[in-house]
Image (cartoon, rainbow, N blue to C red):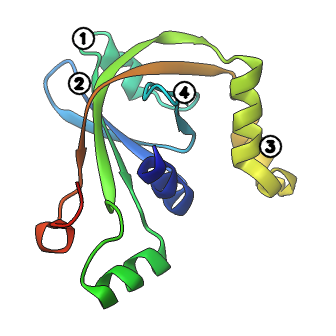
Amino acid sequence: KEVFDACISSSKHSSIATISPDGAPHVTPIGFMFLRDDCSAYYFEQYSKRMPVNFQSNRNVCILVVNSGLSFWVKSLFNARFVSYPGLRLYGTVSDTRPATNEEKKELQKRIGPAKFLKGSSQIWSGLETVRDISITSVAPVAYTKMMDHLP
């Protein structure tokens, strides 16, 4: 969860890979994904058009989060070792959509933070009311072996 949170904090989004009904891969950037303490997740699904179609035939997903923080990378490259994993792949299955709870909406507002006062904020982030739950089945770190040998 700590690595996930660092990745989301630095990159401000995650990417969800799905499989279309004809078997083609499709990747969608998602701005608001949250990992719960029990390692299940949820995300606000508002703008995605292809993912809901893909979920009709295949509910499997692969989520990629990457720590894009400049200080994380400079420190890691300078020391020739990562202090934590530089990214994660989370594999799982998604649920049907459901209305977001009040608690989830509060977490969303917290994540949006001061940006909610900017002009474009209401145009792209108002009306985020629908979420999908994700049951995480496995996690694999993004690997740079020589700089990660010391990590568990």
Give the percent coordinates (x, y) of residue 24.
Answer: 16, 32
Tell me where residue 77 sits by quadrant: bottom left
Residue contact between numbered discs 1 and 3, judged by CB atoms under 8 Å:
no
**Image quarter for residue 49?**
top left
Where is residue 8? Give x, y as percent.
51, 52
In the image shown, does 27 or 76 lie closer to the viewer?
A: 76
Q: Are marks 1 and 2 in contact (CB under 8 Å)?
A: yes
User: What residue sits right under mark 3 in the picture?
Assistant: 122
Q: Amino acid at mark 3?
A: Ser
From the viewer's perspective, is residue 143 above or below residue 30? below
Query: Distance from label 4 to label 1 (Cα)?
Result: 18 Å
Q: Which mark is residue 20?
A: 2
Mark before the other along the chain sequence, 2 or 4: 2
Q: Which mark is residue 57?
A: 1
**What secondary structure is found at the residue carrying circle 3?**
helix
Tell me the CA gap for discs 1 and 3: 33 Å
Real-space Cα separation, disc 3 to disc 2, in angstroms: 31 Å
